[in-house]
Image (cartoon, grey):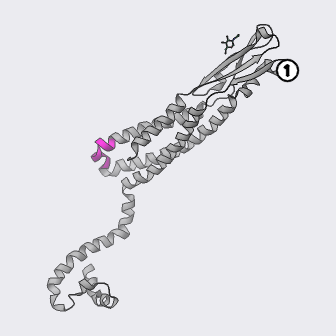
Amino acid sequence: MCMCKFVCLFAIFAFATCGGYTGQLRVSVDCMEKASSNLSIGIDFAYPFRLHQVSFEAPLCEGMRRERVALIGDYSSSAEFFVTIAVFAFLYSLMATIVYIFFQNKYRENNRGPLIDFIVTVVFSFMWLVSSSAWAKALSDVKVATDPDEVQLLISACKIQTNKCGSVHGPRWSGLNTSVVFGFLNFVLWAGNIWFVFKETGWHKGAARYPGGAPEKQAGTFNQQPYNQGSFDQSGGYSAQGDLGQPSEYSQVGGPTSYSNQM
Ligand SMILES: *[C@@H]1O[C@H](CO)[C@@H](O)[C@H](O)[C@H]1NC(C)=O
């Protein structure tokens, strides 16, 4: 968890920008009889984007009568899934940092810490990808559903040609666009972290030790035995072979001794 500070920070950005979002759009309904017009109807919505629960009052352009109009769609599942993953990723990376720093011994005990860390990191990487994708899709739908031009279509008075409806302003999307970017950034970060956590598990060493570790051991015995053998074999006349090493003819001559060394 060497990248933990980034991981924590980026997770916070992801759920803060999405979970803390509030947006507003504003439309105008200009009735033929001006008295009943409302040129500034504000419609507020927020996380978790249960738009079907967001309603506003619009003039019917018939005297002072009004109607209650609701937006369409429920995007709470994707939004809440995204924020939940971000919150849990934040909590996990925070906890992992604490464990890693203060309980280093426990972490390494039986290799259990690195093992759990590895599995959880893989799962979170996958979850970041899924939740960010789902949230990106939901956001594009939310943008359509809260587009003032689309919202006008829901107002009865706007269906009558003589009344004029218009959009005053749409919602600001920078915050939510940022949350999607941070979602995918978190995926990249966690997926990249898999390698570092994997190294902690020591599996790659274990895999490399069987082919790579055996020569290491041989090298160890090599270093010890020639000294012993040097004292025994001094009379052999080939005592210089250890220094030469490279020439192929000599290596054949050296063959028997090096073979016996390996034993
Ligand atoms: C226009 O609609 C808003 C709600 O967005 C309301 O607060 C306001 O009183 C309305 N204005 C008129 C003139 O009816």
Neighbours of disc 1 within 10 Å: few (<14), some (14-19), many (20+): few
- What range is drawn magenta here? 99-108
Residue linked to disc 1: 161
**One can see residue 231 in this view:** yes
Residue positioned 30% across, 49% down in the render: 109
Can you say whether 229 is above or below 180 in the image?
below
Residue positioned 50% across, 48% down in the render: 188
Magenta highlight on residue 263: no
> Picture coordinates of residue 44 (x, y %)?
62, 21
- Asked where in the image residue 132 lies, by quadrant, the reply is top right
Q: Is residue 222 left or right of residue 41?
A: left
Residue positioned 62% across, 26% down in the render: 50
Q: Nearer the viewer, residue 106 or 11?
A: 11
- Asked where in the image residue 46 lies, by quadrant, the reply is top right
> Picture coordinates of residue 24 (x, y %)?
62, 23
**One can see residue 263 in this view:** no
> Picture coordinates of residue 53 (x, y %)?
64, 22
Can you say whether 229 is above or below 67 in the image?
below
> Picture coordinates of residue 218 (x, y %)?
28, 74
Q: Is residue 82 left or right of residue 169?
A: left
Give, as a three-letter code, the residue at label 1.
Gln
Q: Is residue 235 left or right of residue 18?
A: left
